């Protein structure tokens, strides 16, 4: 779709759900900021000072938010802690947090930090099959003792997409605040956080947004909550007009910007600055349609040629994210063998191979080649042979 804007590595790259490829514009933007540092030193802050604020409206479009509802800042885990400190206020009855047992571990670690601090409980929606969640089970878990819910927009392992609108409405009908982790969906599909009434959200920019390893994170705070003063405060969340007055009292910045804390990394922001140009004038609905076409095509190929691999990603478009998860006892060995043959995929213990046909730069021809290579590897496994470079220990998952 915009393949020419990326530095394509040799072989086939299908791991954009872990780390997106480098846009040429990201490299150019970092080089530009480096030159400014070299030539202007501290004088560069005349332009850098509001770089986060200038990026926020661009990112807001990706999550369906007003410009003042988004801040580009911190890391996904740090942002989650900052939001939980403000939004999680347990009461006598509503005191516990609800998540799921399939959440990305960092979310669970953060949630457990706050329930431990308050002496409350983190409850987890169980999975019936170990890979996906049932809508009814999530609703059933929204009991009277729940004060706050955090859910992933897309499950990191299986690629299942949850219904943000319906689950947010259900939480609010029960008087519960709900937040979302959009790490595995932003940049791959449209969102409507404002219109859906989402209370808060966090995400990263190094997957489908392609802003580089350890790129700055993002957070969303709905405008209905923007009168709240962050519990965890830092000088970068202070009102910009008086920030350098170095006042002793905290005067919150407008909107979600108040949840910023420390001085941002300008070089890291620069990579995001360049990466966001890839999305300029890009129709997010068309991007999503292209993503679905690629995952449809890949799953059809797997059905025809790779029957040994179990597709654990839901088939329905409304329930699928941007990657396809395949289960097989030899998934780890397959991931290693694929890399030796020039195909970069991703392994998740104990038995899942994740492949992400990214709409911005992957092609159907690459998927055909990948399936052909997988077929050869599976045939080799049946014959009891190991691919070059694979020791017997590498077959252990």
Image (cartoon, helix red, strand yellow):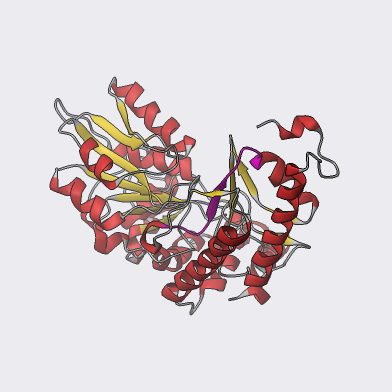
| Residue 298 in the image, given as x and y percentages of width and height | 57, 63
Figure disc tally? 0
| Residue 377 in the image, given as x and y percentages of width and height | 74, 50
Name the residue rendered at 71%, 48% in the picture: 378
Answer yes or no: is residue 55 visible: yes
Range of magenta residues = 320-331
Answer yes or no: is residue 245 visible: no
Is residue 33 left or right of 52 when viewed as pictured? right
From the viewer's side, name the closer residue of 40 and 351: 351
From the viewer's side, name the closer residue of 288 and 234: 288
> Residue 45, located in which quarter of the rendered image?
bottom right
Tell whether position 76 is magenta: no
Compared with 361, 250 (above or below) is above
| Residue 221 in the image, given as x and y percentages of width and height | 31, 53
Outermost residue, top side: 119
Tell whether position 322 is magenta: yes
Compared with 252, 32 (above or below) is below
Name the residue rendered at 29%, 19% in the picture: 119
From the viewer's side, name the closer residue of 18 and 265: 18
From the viewer's side, name the closer residue of 190 and 333: 333
| Residue 227 in the image, given as x and y percentages of width and height | 22, 51
Is residue 122 left or right of 38 when viewed as pictured? left
**Viewport quadrant of the N terminus:** bottom right
Outermost residue, right side: 388
């Amino acid at each position: 779709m915009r393949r020419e804007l990326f530095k394509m590595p040799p072989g086939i790259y299908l791991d954009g759900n872990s780390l997106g490829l480098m846009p040429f514009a990201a490299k150019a933007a970092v080089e530009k900021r480096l030159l400014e540092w070299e030539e202007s030193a501290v004088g560069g802050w005349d332009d850098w000072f509001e770089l986060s604020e200038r990026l926020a409206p661009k990112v807001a479009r990706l999550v369906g938010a007003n410009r003042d509802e988004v801040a580009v800042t911190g890391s996904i885990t740090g942002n989650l802690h900052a939001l939980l400190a403000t939004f999680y206020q347990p009461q006598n009855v509503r005191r516990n947090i609800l998540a799921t047992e399939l959440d990305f571990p960092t979310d669970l670690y953060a949630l457990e930090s706050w329930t431990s601090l308050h002496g409350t409980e983190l409850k987890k929606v169980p999975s019936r099959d170990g890979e996906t969640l049932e809508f009814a089970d999530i609703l059933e878990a929204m009991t009277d003792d729940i004060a706050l819910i955090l859910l992933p927009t897309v499950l990191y392992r299986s690629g299942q997409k949850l219904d943000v609108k319906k689950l947010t409405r259900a939480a609010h009908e029960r008087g519960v605040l709900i937040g979302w982790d959009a790490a595995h969906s932003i940049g791959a599909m449209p969102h409507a956080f404002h219109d859906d009434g989402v209370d808060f959200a966090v995400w990263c920019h190094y997957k489908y947004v392609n802003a580089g390893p350890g790129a700055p994170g993002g957070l969303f705070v709905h405008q209905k909550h923007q009168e709240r003063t962050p519990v965890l405060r830092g000088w970068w969340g202070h009102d910009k007009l008086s920030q350098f007055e170095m006042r002793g009292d905290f005067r919150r910045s407008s909107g979600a910007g108040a949840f910023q804390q420390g001085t941002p990394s300008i070089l890291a922001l620069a990579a995001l600055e360049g990466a966001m140009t890839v999305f300029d004038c890009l129709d997010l609905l068309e991007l999503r349609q292209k993503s679905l076409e690629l995952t449809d095509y890949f799953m059809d190929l797997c059905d025809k040629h790779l029957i040994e691999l179990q597709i654990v990603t839901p088939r329905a478009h409304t329930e699928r994210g941007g990657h396809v998860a395949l289960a097989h006892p030899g998934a780890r060995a397959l991931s290693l063998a694929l890399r030796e043959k020039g195909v970069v995929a991703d392994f998740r213990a104990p038995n899942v191979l994740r492949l992400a046909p990214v709409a911005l730069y992957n092609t159907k021809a690459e998927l055909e080649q990948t399936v052909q290579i997988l077929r050869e590897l599976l045939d080799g496994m049946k014959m009891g042979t190991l691919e070059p470079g694979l020791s017997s220990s590498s077959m252990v998952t």
